[in-house]
Amino acid sequence: MSVRPGRLAQLDVLRGIAVFGILLVNIWGFAWGTLSLRYGTLPTPAPWLDQAAIFLVAAFAEFKFYPIFAFLFGAGFALHTRSLRQQLGSWQAAQAAYQRRLRWLLLIGLLHGFLIWSGDVLSSYALGGMLILSLASARLGRVRNLAWLLAGGFLLFMALLYPVSPSMTADDTTRQLQEFAGRYAIYTEGGLLAVAALRVRDYAMQMLFVIVMLPHVIVLFSLGILSVRLGWLTEPRRHRHVWHRVLAVGLGLGLPFNLLAATVLLQQTIDPYQTNYNSTLFELLLYAGGPLLAAGYVASLMLAGPALMAALARWLAPVGRMALSNYLAQSLLGTFLLQGWGLAWGARLRPIEMLALALAIMVAQIVISRCWLARFRQGPVEALWRRLAR
């Protein structure tokens, strides 16, 4: 299957990779929510395959693919508003048209969060997009300055947050484990109404978290806008020197840090009472370390040769072209398979089996995406979204 004329193959491939990377992390949340102990706990002694599954996801997926998705949202914003400006004749009309899209995306996100899964990101992207509408026609210097200002402010906020974060005592850990056990029982064994009530409460808490995270999201949007307007994403061969530098920094700094952070998270999963590492510190630092490695992933793809890019585009571009449909389908299928209102597999699947389930969903979505786009121009949700936003 070839990429439609006018589309950028590398962006579709990146979207496909990001959607699948997000699934590797979300699969755990589908089973028991997202508010604490993402990977649950492991029995003693912990099977090495289960340890490997958790370590690999924590090291190479957690906090790596949502930054790519947000980065691509910013890139899509720049490309789409530019196209709307050419069609409608003014930036004001383009921004108004794009705002309609964002309003409908916000509604889709709210329905997703309240009715399917509490870990929705669409609502935060819609809110962030509304806040950056004026950047569609802004000078490059303004976009760059905003990115630096928000990035510095967010990092300062995280640095100030750590000293005031209370240290976890043994009693705190016991309460956290008890809370997790209760949530685990409801999500994996509860009926439709019990799961729905807990999901609504979790999503309300998630929305409070979104407000705190908006500066971080807008920084990633801004980087996507800059990458399009500077040609880094649209003409990667002309900017190979840029991507080589990004690759060196992303892998050189990001990889060692994320391997260490994954070791800490795995240790916490094996022994929640461990005191050798400050897990709170590493979770906070992942907000910086995760995007660094994500940048390395993006650079690796931008530097890929034509043959590799063609092979990736054949299999992953269709997934990326209907990324919204695939993202929502993952939530619907994952919650049905893992939660108590559905097949309740979450109550009995080991971590290695959870990872295998995620990989099986990926294979199915590759096949379905290719078949769907052989007959239709867009994914079903993308087509509905476009029709509603007219």
Image: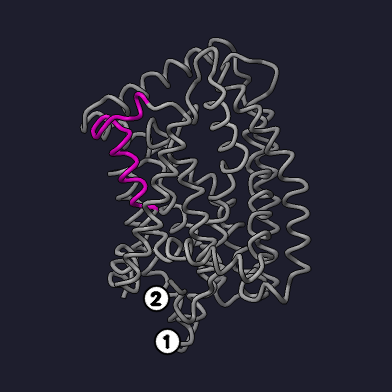
Mark 1 crowdedness (10 Å alpha carbons): few <14, some 14-19, many ≥20: few
Q: Residue at x 44, y 50 (%)?
A: 121
- Answer left or right for 233 relative to 88: right
Residue type at tag 2 = Ala
Relative image position of residue 282 (x, y in whole percent) = 66, 32
Relative image position of residue 380 (x, y in whole percent) = 29, 64
Residue type at tag 1 = Leu
Relative image position of residue 270 (x, y in whole percent) = 56, 19
Of all residues, the one furthest to the bottom in this rendering is 89
> In this picture, is 341 found above or below 316?
above
Quarter placement of the C terminus: bottom left
Q: Residue at x 56, y 68 (%)?
A: 10
Q: Residue at x 78, y 55 (%)?
A: 248
Tag shown at residue 61: none
N-terminal label among 2 and 1: 1
Q: Secondary structure at mark 2?
A: helix
The residue identified by callout 1 is 88
Q: Which residues are magenta?
A: 327-348
Mark 2 crowdedness (10 Å alpha carbons): few <14, some 14-19, many ≥20: some
Q: Secondary structure at mark 1?
A: helix
Task: In this rendered view, identify the residue nearer to me: 84 or 191.
Answer: 191
Tell me if label 2 and label 1 are in contact, CB under 8 Å. yes
The residue identified by callout 2 is 97
Separation of marks 2 and 1 at Cα, in angstroms = 9 Å
Say if the magenta span includes residue 347. yes
* The quadrant where residue 200 appears: top left
- Answer left or right for 384 relative to 52: left
Relative image position of residue 126 (x, y in whole percent) = 43, 59
